[in-house]
Amino acid sequence: MRLGVNIDHVATLRQARRGKYPDPVAAAAVAELGGADQITLHVREDRRHVNDRDLSLLRQTVNGTLNLEMAAVQAMVDLALHERPDTCTLVPERREELTTEGGLDAIGHRDEVRRVTRALRDGGIEVSLFIDPDLEQIKASHRADAQAVELHTGRYCEARGAEERKRELSRLVDAAKAAGKLGLRVAAGHGLDYWNVKPVAGIDEIGELNIGYAIVCRAVLVGLERAVRDMKELIARPGRA
Ligand code: PXP
């Protein structure tokens, strides 16, 4: 199981004082030492945490893959084609939200998603769509010519009680199977932590998890390298809740 470490939250801390530290670029290097296979970052249109300088330096320094989360808009396409991350994950973006709240609507925004996907793929960048674990969204992602989907695990993570959690996990299982059958590479993420990750890591079709908040929060107490290593060990031995 590949682990993408989302370093946005390190940049959020830096922006609290608008200074130089902690530097998400340094954090990415340490995350890689801890076993991160990928560095994930979300350059928001309002640049509220990660900025263009971070993306540019990360492109030059990250050894594994670089995954840029972005809105499906032309300004971000231009930036991506300039910096050339390995993967672009298209996400919905609303300025007032605290974090990405729901999946991308690949049905409602069919034309722009398709156009942006084409432009990025023509630039040699893999395109993944961050969608809810919903069959219609998976089919729409396939029709839009995306090569991958990232299944939104938020509802699973927020489920209250064993029954609801089981139901949400089975939605993820069904969605991962359907996406795999269509030949899409399958990732998952949002809200995963050290207590809820194992059942998701145990879904065969899912090959990558993108995790940020829980890792950065643990890093405050134990250090980033250990926090990444702890997560990497957990997801390498999945299936036990
Ligand atoms: N994947 C995507 C597409 C996201 O937008 C986010 C949040 O930025 C994550 C994964 C990571 O979520 P979390 O920080 O809750 O682990």
Image (cartoon, grey):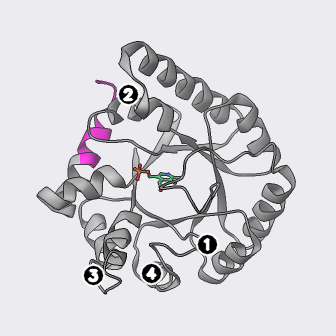
Q: Nearer the viewer, mark 4 or mark 2?
A: 4
For disc 2, the marked residue is: 199
Q: Residue furthest top?
A: 163
Tell me the quadrant of the picture where the N terminus can be found.
top left
Mark nearer the viewer, 1 or 2: 1
Q: Is residue 206 above or below residue 148?
A: above
- The residue under the point 25% across, 70% down is 30
Q: Amino acid at mark 1?
A: Glu
Residue on which the image places disc 4: 54
Magenta residue check for 240: yes
Q: Residues in magenta?
A: 231-241
Residue ID at (12%, 57%): 222
Q: Which residue is mark 1?
A: 45
Question: Helix or strand or loop: what does disc 2 sit on?
Answer: helix
Could you say which is closer to the camera, residue 67 or residue 75? Answer: 75
Q: Nearer the viewer, residue 20 or 182?
A: 20
Who's the residue at 26% across and 40% down the image?
194
Find residue 206 and name its label.
Answer: none
CB of residue at label 2: within 8 Å of ligand 1? no
Crowdedness near tag 1: few (<14), some (14–19) or many (≥20) residues, C-alpha within 10 Å:
some
Three-letter amino acid code at disc 2?
A: Pro
